[in-house]
């Protein structure tokens, strides 16, 4: 029972308390803001898995976000697929692209991989921008159907909120399981010292690809959610600056820390909303916060080591509870 | 007719390539000495162009003075960049647990952050739209040599590049600063043992590299007639591509590959739409990293 | 006499013009304790890298348990039962001691994401048990939850060995295990390694501490300039004129 309590609290907070608060302060706009933050938490949690836990610093994550968004948008507008099909489809397609594009780059390490992902992200963005015949280029895709189910509910700010909230919670659950387990240890080993990991019997290439695939799946999912909740997407939503924003969020929150990713997102997206005057200077704030973070808090606000420790200690995820070591999964 | 057109594109590509080469040199110098990627190099390029533009609009001095002003401001910016984004992380270099990989990532992120801040500040101050260079300074006077037409700017680029490259060569081989740069690039610990002041060398490298980058930015601004805050991003990436293609530690390799890149881009742009031309650099990048990890000319260091 | 556990035949490794390992042949029998010594730069670590798949062979073969492993990747060779420690300790500083050790267990038992996703407790428990066993063998129970970065140098050595043990290896390769340890620590380590051997582990180790090697190893191979120059018992080696000459030129001090 002790283990279920935190989960129940989180579920209640997100699905009951939060919407209540948002309605109280005026609904509408605030629901949209929270929905945006929700979509980005899915993005950052997925980026955290590949860049934080596995150590494959990616500067092109927004590209995969874009692939997911365009997949969903095109499936919905051209083939009239409903959202419950476009969402998983977007995830799968993006994961597939992710594997295809990343496979050749798996040999690369550190900054070389990072710059390769930058190149990939730009290639994706430029292709979305210039392949007008397929993606409508800079005009973007509009009139994307919202999240609605005939007879049950029609698209609205509140429906969008719940769709994104549920998706984010599921993402957190899945990625949490992956990261807070022995599998997560394997990924962390790849980050810490991939040559050593290989000499200890870890199939490093396979782990990297798996990590990338999972991250891209959820990035695609986030993109699809973005498409359906905003109704309009264009290549400008998926540029390098978005990739940097995502990176900044996970750095601020703590590389390798799942709750850190969420915190980083809330801070970097929420702050400009709450402190309106800052809003115009958003990217400057992002840059400054990121810089100060790296300089003074290189492990982020909720460092990975403290998170793992807390999870094992407080939430009973440890094998051998007296020593708080090991994982139960 | 087709041949002339093609040759014309080659010539244009050469000019573009030389610009990338000037930037690539700065990148390669810094990488050689510190083993880090300077993500803010593109912003130095942008600073150079804005410094020149400001000089023109405020003082309207002769062209040579504009170039010198841009270079001076670029040098100072390079110094500032090194102190802010790179130096603070060297204090932790001695910790055993912070291997150089962690430091490389830290400086990657810090220079990235600084580049964002600088770019956004420029957008706030100057507006994100293009600023045009006054007519008198534009180097677009057409010059006809045989069937090919050049713009005067291209000669300036060529001349400037030759001067800079020559100057750099002289600096690296004939001066103490240059010698210490080569020494530190070769063996940082060994360099300290023989009494070379690594800190000063690193600063010097940044200053020199930034001077070149700023000059490149200014000349491009004059040649294309318009500058904007985000102008440094694409050339910055292309300079990095050239460096990687050239084998990371080779300046000559970087220059040659930058020219190849420029020509490829010009040819692509003329046969396809403008947008696809930008794609060339990124495709080259990915292909190089995957198939030629030691660069096209070998001699790359480290595992890639 | 059954086939040796490790059989190296005419192994060579070339780096451009340099022949780091030159036509090296040698073997380790099951249960043996074999030492590998030689002056600095003799190619000992390169040989280890060849055996463990870190570097590809330029020519020659390596056989483990009568199967050719020359072209296998490092992780495949590890999974067959070859574990190693490193000369410059490579513990993973941001992971706890237990998590570090679990890497070896993960290597041996596999690391599918489905284990975590589908909640396969049994697999995880097996990894936990094996890791804890290795930690107990190495005497690191009290540090199990500590960050590896906070461990003393001596403890880190045991951590590396524990991690290798978690692989349940049949051959343990130790690269300068006693380096940097004082006499007491070295003696304790020697005792620990001897116990591992008595429990059935085959050992191949590189060491510069001659007393360590002589007391622990049943057989010693000597390398110089990439070649094997001697192979015999510690007594035979210490009297071999070729060996003595190889050492005279280097800044070696025999312990």
Image: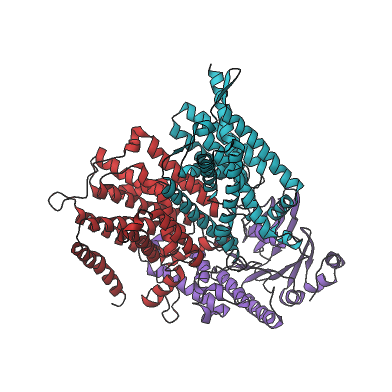
> Which residue is at the front of the view, B18 or C73?
B18
Q: Is residue C63 left or right of residue A256?
A: right
* Furthest-top residue in this view: B1
Q: Is residue A86 visible?
A: yes
Q: Residue sitting at 60 percent across and 72 percent down?
A: C161
Q: Residue sitting at 45 percent across and 32 percent down?
A: B274
> Which residue is at the front of the view, A118 or A23?
A23
The answer to which quarter of the image holds residue C167 is: bottom right
Q: Colour of chain B?
A: cyan
Q: Is residue A106 visible?
A: no
- Looking at the image, residue C49 lies above or below residue C34: above
Q: Point out residue C130 in the picture as x, y percentages from the top left corner.
A: 49, 73
Which chain, by letter, is purple? C
> Which residue is at the front of the view, A112 or B188?
B188
Q: Point out residue A191 in the picture as x, y percentages from the top left corner.
A: 51, 61
Which chain, by letter, is red? A
Q: Point out residue B25 in the picture as x, y percentages from the top left corner.
A: 62, 44
């Amino acid at each position: 029972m002790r283990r279920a309590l935190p989960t129940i609290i989180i579920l209640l907070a997100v699905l009951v308390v939060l919407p209540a608060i948002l309605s109280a302060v005026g609904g509408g706009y605030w629901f949209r803001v929270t929905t945006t933050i929700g979509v980005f938490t899915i993005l950052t949690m997925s980026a955290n898995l590949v860049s934080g836990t596995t150590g494959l610093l990616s500067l092109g994550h927004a590209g995969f976000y874009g692939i997911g968004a365009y997949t969903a948008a095109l499936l919905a507008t051209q083939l009239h697929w409903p959202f419950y099909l476009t969402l998983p489809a977007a995830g799968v397609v993006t994961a597939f692209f992710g594997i295809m594009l990343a496979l050749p780059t798996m040999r690369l390490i550190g900054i070389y991989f990072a710059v390769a992902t930058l190149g990939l992200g730009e290639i994706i963005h430029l292709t979305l921008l210039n392949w007008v015949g397929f993606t409508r280029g800079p005009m973007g895709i509009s009139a994307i159907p919202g999240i609605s189910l005939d007879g049950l509910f029609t698209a609205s700010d509140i429906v969008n909120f719940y769709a994104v909230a549920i998706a984010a919670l599921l993402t957190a659950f899945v990625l949490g399981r992956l990261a807070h387990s022995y599998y997560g240890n394997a990924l962390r080993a790849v980050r810490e010292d991939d040559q050593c990991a290989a000499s200890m019997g870890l199939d490093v290439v396979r782990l990297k690809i798996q990590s990338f695939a999972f991250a891209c799946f959820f990035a695609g999912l986030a993109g699809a959610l973005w498409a359906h909740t905003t109704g309009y997407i264009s290549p400008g939503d998926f540029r390098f600056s978005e990739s940097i924003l995502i990176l900044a969020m996970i750095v601020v929150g703590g590389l390798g820390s799942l709750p850190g990713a969420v915190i980083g997102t809330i801070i970097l997206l929420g702050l400009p909303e709450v402190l309106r005057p800052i809003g115009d200077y958003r990217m400057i704030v992002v840059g400054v916060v990121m810089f100060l973070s790296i300089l003074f808090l290189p492990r982020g606000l909720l460092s990975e080591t403290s998170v793992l420790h807390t999870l094992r200690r407080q939430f009973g995820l440890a094998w051998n509870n007296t020593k708080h070591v090991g994982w139960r999964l | 007719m087709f041949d002339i057109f093609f040759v014309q594109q080659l010539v244009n590509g050469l000019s573009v390539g030389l610009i990338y080469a000037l930037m690539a040199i700065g990148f390669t110098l810094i990488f050689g000495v510190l083993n880090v990627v300077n993500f803010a190099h593109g912003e130095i390029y942008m600073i150079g162009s804005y410094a020149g533009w400001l000089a023109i609009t405020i003082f309207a001095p002769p062209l040579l003075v504009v170039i010198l002003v841009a270079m001076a401001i670029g040098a100072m910016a390079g110094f500032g960049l090194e102190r802010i984004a790179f130096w603070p992380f060297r204090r932790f270099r001695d910790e055993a647990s912070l291997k150089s990989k962690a430091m490389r990532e830290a400086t990657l992120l810090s220079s990235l952050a600084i580049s964002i801040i600088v770019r956004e500040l420029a957008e706030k101050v100057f507006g994100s739209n293009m600023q045009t260079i006054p007519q008198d300074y534009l180097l677009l006077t057409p010059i006809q040599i045989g069937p090919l037409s050049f713009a005067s700017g291209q000669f300036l680029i060529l001349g400037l590049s030759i001067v800079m490259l020559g100057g750099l060569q002289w600096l690296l081989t004939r001066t103490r600063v240059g010698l210490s740069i080569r020494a530190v690039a070769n063996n940082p610990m060994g360099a300290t043992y023989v009494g070379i002041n690594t800190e000063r060398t690193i600063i010097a490298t940044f200053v020199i590299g930034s001077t070149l980058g700023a000059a490149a930015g200014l000349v491009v601004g004059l040649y294309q007639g318009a500058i904007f805050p985000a102008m440094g991003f694409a050339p910055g990436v292309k300079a990095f591509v050239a460096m990687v293609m050239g084998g990371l530690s080779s300046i000559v390799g970087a220059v040659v590959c930058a020219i190849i890149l420029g020509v490829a881009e010009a040819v692509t742009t003329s046969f396809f739409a403008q947008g696809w031309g930008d794609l060339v650099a990124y495709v080259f990048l990915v292909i190089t990293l995957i198939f030629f990890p030691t660069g096209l000319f070998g001699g790359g260091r480290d595992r890639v | 006499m059954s086939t040796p556990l490790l059989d190296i035949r005419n192994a060579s490794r070339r780096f451009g013009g340099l022949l780091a390992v030159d036509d090296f042949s040698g073997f380790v029998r099951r249960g043996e304790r074999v030492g590998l010594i030689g002056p600095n730069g003799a190619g000992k670590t390169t040989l280890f890298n060849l055996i463990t798949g870190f570097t590809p062979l330029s020519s020659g073969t390596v056989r483990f348990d009568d199967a050719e492993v020359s072209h296998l990747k490092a992780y495949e060779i590890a999974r067959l039962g070859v574990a190693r420690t490193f000369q410059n300790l490579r513990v993973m500083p941001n992971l706890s001691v237990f998590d570090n050790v679990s890497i070896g267990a993960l290597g041996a038992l596999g690391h599918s994401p489905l284990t975590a996703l589908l909640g396969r407790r049994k697999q995880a428990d097996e990894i936990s048990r094996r890791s804890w066993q290795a930690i107990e063998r190495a005497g690191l129970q009290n540090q199990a939850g500590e960050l590896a970065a906070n461990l003393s140098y001596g403890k880190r050595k045991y951590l590396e060995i524990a991690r290798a043990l978690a692989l349940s290896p049949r051959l343990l390769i130790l690269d300068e295990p006693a380096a940097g340890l004082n006499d007491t620590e070295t003696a304790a380590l020697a005792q620990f390694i001897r116990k591992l051997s008595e429990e059935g582990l085959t050992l191949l180790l590189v060491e510069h501490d001659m007393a360590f090697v002589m007391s622990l190893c049943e057989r010693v191979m000597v390398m110089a300039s990439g070649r094997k120059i001697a192979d015999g018992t510690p007594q035979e080696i210490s009297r071999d004129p070729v060996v003595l000459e190889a050492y005279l030129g280097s800044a070696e001090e025999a312990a």
